[in-house]
Image (cartoon, rainbow, N blue to C red):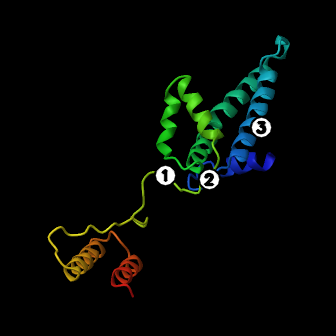
Amino acid sequence: MFISYAKTWANSFNLDKRTTRSEYFAFYFLDLIVLGLISALVFTDDYSRGDEQIAYIGLFWFYLLGGFIPRVTCLIRRIKDTGRSTGWIFWSFVPFLGTLVLLVIALQPSSKKRKDSFPIEVTDTVPVQLVNSATSNSDKESLKSKLEELKKLKKEGLISDEEYEKLRQKNLEI
């Protein structure tokens, strides 16, 4: 539990990692305990403490606001871990219902699919499906049009050299 808590704080600005269900709930459980302990110090009935009470109030707000980014990034990484887009974080702007939707998402099991954060990098692979030309009548013309389309995709930078070679060999049945 403490490792998950420390890991979340250490990865506060890293959205490329993933957060498992157990790490997510361990972090939030410990975070609620810390907030509860600080709140107990702040909201006691002993008003004779004066400056000490002001320091506890400052500590409460410092922890509450300072922990905003780790809490949000932990949720975003958990959303990505379920195989969903980071756009689901916008449910947090919907009162009550948004909280329920995000809780249901957080309870979902991890997915093998990987959703990247915004923006998508140029180095990401783009799935390519070659479209069979409607005007070709023979297999040779079809193969020729597929190879031309592959060259065009490679020239435009939509596929890498390795992808081009794999697709070319697949079409030539080498």
Q: Which residue position is annotated with label 1?
A: 117
> Tag 1's secondary structure?
loop
Q: Which mark lies nearer to you, 2 or 3?
A: 2
Residue underneath mark 2: 18
Q: Earlier in the sequence, mark 2 or mark 3?
A: 2
Q: Residue at x 76, y 23 (%)?
A: 39
Residue 134 located left or right of residue 155: left
The answer to whether mark 3 and mark 1 are in CB contact below 8 A is no
Instruction: Measure the C-alpha gap from mark 3 to mark 1.
Output: 26 Å
Q: Residue at x 49, y 55 (%)?
A: 116
Residue neighbourhood size for the residue with mark 3, other residues' Cα within 10 Å, grouped as few (<14), some (14–19), many (≥20): some
Q: Amino acid at mark 2?
A: Arg
What residue is shown at x 39% (from left), y 64% (from top)? 126
Contact (Cβ within 8 Å) of mark 2 with mark 3: no
**What whole-number distance in Å separates the C-alpha atoms at marks 2 and 3?**
19 Å
How far apart marks 1 and 2 lie (CA) works out to: 11 Å
**Image quarter hosting the C terminus:** bottom left
Could you tell which of marks 3 and 1 lies nearer the N-terminus? 3
Residue pointed to by mark 3: 30
Vertical side of 142 occupied by 99: above or below: above
Q: Amino acid at mark 3?
A: Leu
- Give the image location of residue 146, x and y in percent: 26, 76
Q: Amino acid at mark 1?
A: Ser
Tell me where residue 125 appears, x and y as whole percent.
42, 66
